[in-house]
Amino acid sequence: MTKLDPIALDEQARAILRANDRGGYTVPTAGLYPYQWNWDSAFAAWGFATFDVTRAWDEVETLFSGQWPNGMVPHILFHRPDPGYFPGPDVWGAEDVGPVPSSGISQPAVAATFIRAIWEKDRAAGAAHLKTLFPKIKAWHRWFMEWREQDGMIFVSHPWEAGRDNCADWDSAMARLDPVGVGEYTRRDTSHVNPAMRPTKADYDRYIWLVQRGRRMGWDEAQMAVDRPFRVADPTLSFILLRANRDLAVMADALGEDRREIDEWTARLEAGAARLKNPETGIFDAIDLGDGRHTGHVTSASFLCWYAGVEDAKTLAALEKCFETTRYGVPSLSVQSPEFDGMRYWRGPTWAIINTLIGLGLADMGHHGHAERVRQMTRALIADHGFAEYFHPQTGDPAGGGTFTWTAAVWLAWASPSQGEN
Ligand code: GLC
């Protein structure tokens, strides 16, 4: 039974954001993730905006302070060295490419959507911030369209770029990689949390091999694009950028900026979204661009269509089925999948942030009952099991890092009863 004390939980969530605050940016959780992560920060900013709008703007501005000259906003900014994390700046070898030492790949573009939400909370306070950020966000979205788009779908060049590190969607493309010469290295993640909750060594060898390849090429996109060994069209990146472009266009109007280029991106991504629909299952999934095949996996990203403004009856039916079979959905891999593993990272567990995006999309598209269901599940999950990184979708057991920034942030901005109903 849920022992819900909303006031105490709101307090705890704010305390987590404050404790993970490193001055202008928050770490996802102390120890396991000691730097600034891209999409984590966008969620953090949205959470901060519920009680400190100024701090929310700081968070996104610090994120964009790491933007590369080519427009890319890195997935990790290594503001201060921390020996407890691997792979750190010395492995990425991108210290001199951008203004802040960073990784060489990006992450799902949720920032524009949450920047819009923060600005709408207080337009007068946000006007100057928005004006400065707008061209930066646009340059980042353009980078995606230039270097990560194919047939209107956005692909990942490294599993970490989707934010769903070891998801089953990458398996076929990962199997084709031969991580020869990757050498010896010491993982740090498995000393912070139980290795059974983390990606395997076979996965890690390939992650590092891809990083080494980018580093050899000086992270030059033109060079890397010639013969990419790993390319998977991804519903996370595609749906999220589609939504972000719509939000960016609204902000362009408010600023009196030209929105035509953004609208062209939106149209391309709308066409691409239709291609992500697997003709055999009728569900949106990933496409391994190495062989053109749909991966066939029903993941939580399959349910991001509404977030992107894409309606789909079959997916709604699949969501209803998920409500029946999964106590604390939406799982990162369907509980019916033979590959389902309820505790191993993106191969089964439920993530509150993905639920939030699914819920926001459902509400926007008028599916208020479904949206409320996703919200109630997420609310119960956090109220009963804490602000963990992720959770077992059947038992609710918390896993990964504890006192997690983005779980606290989405509690404050969306899951908490203090946010009202959809
Ligand atoms: C993991 C997650 C990724 C997240 C990061 C920090 O790598 O897969 O989505 O951004 O941790 O929380």
Image (cartoon, rainbow, N blue to C red):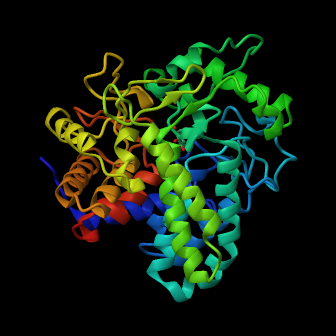
Q: Residue at x 72, y 42 (%)?
A: 103
Q: Nearer the viewer, residue 33 or 62?
A: 62
Q: Determine which quarter of the picture holds residue 338.
A: top left
Judge whether residue 20 can be spotted in this image. no
Residue 285 position within the rendered picture, expressed as x and y whole percent measured from the top left:
41, 33
Name the side, left or right, on which 415 lies relative to 111: left
Judge whether residue 239 can be spotted in this image. yes
Q: Nearer the viewer, residue 264 or 164?
A: 264
Residue 32 position within the rendered picture, expressed as x and y whole percent measured from the top left:
56, 38
Residue 230 position within the rendered picture, expressed as x and y whole percent measured from the top left:
64, 25
Q: Residue at x 79, y 29 (%)?
A: 226
Is residue 380 shown above or below 277? below
Q: Nearer the viewer, residue 168 or 36?
A: 168
Q: Residue at x 55, y 86 (%)?
A: 125
Quadrant of image for the C terminus: bottom left
Marks counted in the figure total 0
Q: Residue at x 29, y 59 (%)?
A: 415
Is residue 62 shown above or below 237? below
Name the side, left or right, on which 19 lies relative to 180: left
Name the side, left or right, on which 340 lies relative to 327: right
Q: Determine which quarter of the picture holds residue 202.
A: top right
Residue 74 position within the rendered picture, expressed as x and y whole percent measured from the top left:
69, 48
Name the side, left or right, on which 32 lies relative to 258: left
Q: Nearer the viewer, residue 407 or 318?
A: 318
